[in-house]
Image (spheres, grey):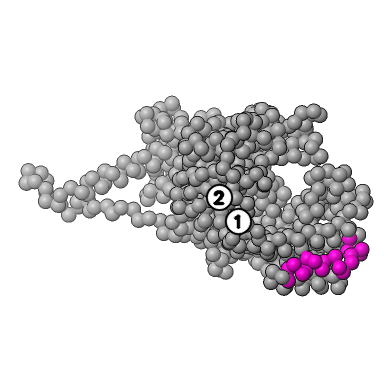
Amino acid sequence: MNARADLLALDADTLAALANRGLVKRAARELDSGAGASVSLDAAGEVTAAFPDGSRAALPAGVPLEAGTCSCPAPGVCRHLVGLVLAYQAQARSQARSRSASASEPESAPTSGPAAGPGAKAPVPPPEPELPWSPAEFDDAALLAAFGRPALAAARRAWERGVRVTVQRMDAAHPAPSVELPSCTVRFPVPRSLNFALSGATAARHGELVTLAVWAFRAADEDGTPSGSARTAGGPKRADAGTAAATADRAQPAPATATATATATATAAVAALTEELLRTGTARTGPVLLAQLARVEAELAAVSAHWPAAAAAELRVQLAAYADRDTRHDPDRVAELLVELRARLRAADRALALGTGESAVTQLRRTRLVALGCRVSAGRGGAERCTELYLAQPDAGIALVLRKRWAVPEGRPGTGAELAGRRLLGHSVRALAGSNLVSESVSRSAGRAVTVERGRIASTSVTPLGDAWASLPAPLLLHDAAARLRALGGRPPRPVRPRIEAENAHVLAVAEVGPLGYDPARQRLEAVLRDPAGTEVRLSAEHDVLCPGRIDALAAALESGTVTHVSGLLRPEAGRPVLDPLAVRTAAGPVHPDLAAETDPHPFTALPPAAADPLAAALTAARTALAELARTGLDAALPHQLAPAAAALRRTGLRTAAALLDALAADPSPDRWTDAALHLLTALDLHREEARP
């Protein structure tokens, strides 16, 4: 019987994802101490293991690890099943070394020894590296055998609606092919094996998600889609994903028509409501319009149109803030949300723009999360504070956000230093911001927001962060920030991109920290970091009254001389990478600027004032003019209101933008306003990201 190649391909990280890291470490210690199992492989490919404590475990061929059996009372994947894999791998390595040593003996033995006969063993060549392979090799018969008819039927329904996917093929930098789905990331760490595919989802959805990932690879291979490119796979035209999938659910009526009708009704309601808001003006929004907006939000959520539903929710908060004279109201942001809602209805790739086809929440199996830091902000007229814990999910290679809102008693400042001591999941916010979490009660939304179910806190363990940042996979851990920005090039415009939480959260490996400077006009600390690839990354952090110790704590950490990593939100600005820091890793441990207490002011070197940018000024002025029109209403618009902004655009050479404003002045309609606003917002984003001073 040939060796079990699937078991030999399992590394410690994959075993930890299938069981948990503690079991892997314990089984490895027992093996190293001589208390490991004795294993055997029979002709059918079943591996059996006998342990010194009397337990016996078995893992037949062609089944996942959780399908193995063990005589111990522990449920699920126990330490004996993990120990079986480790012992089998150790035995295979020992046998390979013995064969290699035997084959390396001299061809001419001494005369006193036995002559090498015709049956002597030839040298065993070293194992060849696994050739690139694609999960598209799995046919639907294999998927049906592995996951069953219900899983394929659920996958087919999602495929018919269209699924946003990012396919990463196998290469030198990515030894395991993977597919990023809106609800999780599916990886195939063991070549040509469905049994050890990792999704992070619970057993109820695991088969469905792995099936979607296989179909995504098929579609990408057929279309020649490059690795790392986001696209919408499936949809009505690609509903025949496979014979088995197409026949898996014939007894049930296809829901595509009903879903399409409900989606069309919800999007028509969005179009009508945003048109009314633009015509009458957001300043005249009353309880009736707010109730209509809440209804539209619910309708969008019901058809899994996640991105416009989230935009509608944010717009409702903004309009309510205006009515309450709340400082959170931002007229420019209101205009951006109106543009976003209307632009998503125009997008050619509707599934990508609406976020349809995925459940709002996905329950994850036992999951390890690595804290990247904390951000503090205000909410609800100053009566609330919000902490956002950024968490890396190493198995999926993505970042998530755990958000918690806190009521602030009257007369209390509610600063980050005060919130640092509040309890969350049985631990202080400060402890969670610098920890590893392992939980069985985590669920994530399509937008990558994390929740932990109430009543299951005991299933969440928290340990110190240690050096977990250094072992994060790419692109969570960056050694070349410029390469990461290049990989993000070519994304759709922001108004139609998926609304992903923590999309730009990363840990930057730091090779060198440059001098610090402070801009008193903008109350901003800046420093130059250099990553191992030599890329200069500008660190930029603004003062916040809610985090009075942020700037000084950050400066002290950067000047300590022991900085190894900085976590933060990465963005392009003027063609260069800029990092908004969340936490700093030093020899003394992590530093969380937003949670730091206020100290004596740090002496800084003043930065020179920023150079004037006439293009950005003209685009910003035009955006403000459009936001004012949205506030007052297009029905009351006068042609001369846009004339100064159009003239400024024309002076800077932006003739197309100026022509769009002229067209709006001549015909102040919602469609003309959307044309101009979408053009201006996209142009402003691109200019800020790419224009060099």
* Residue drawn at (59%, 58%) of the image: 574
Q: Quadrant of the C terminus?
A: bottom right
Marks 1 and 2, how far apart at CA: 9 Å
| Part of the protein shown in magenta | 633-650
Q: Is residue 636 magenta?
A: yes
Q: Amino acid at mark 1?
A: Glu
Q: Position of residue 504 (x, y in %)?
A: 61, 50
* Residue drawn at (60%, 62%) of the image: 691
* Residue drawn at (66%, 27%) of the image: 421
User: In the rendered structure, which disc, 1 or 2, sits on the residue that comes first in sequence?
Assistant: 2
Q: Position of residue 115 (x, y in %)?
A: 11, 49
* Residue drawn at (64%, 62%) of the image: 687
Q: Position of residue 488 (x, y in %)?
A: 58, 59
Height in image: 46 above or below 57? below
User: Would you identify the image quadrant in which residue 647 lies?
Assistant: bottom right
Identify the residue position indicated by label 1 in the image.
573
Instruction: Specify few, some or many for label 1: CA neighbours under 10 Å numbering under 14, 14-19, or 20 or more.
Output: some
Residue 90, label in figure: none
Q: Amino acid at mark 2?
A: Arg
Q: Position of residue 316 (x, y in %)?
A: 83, 50
Is residue 122 visible in the rendered image? The answer is yes
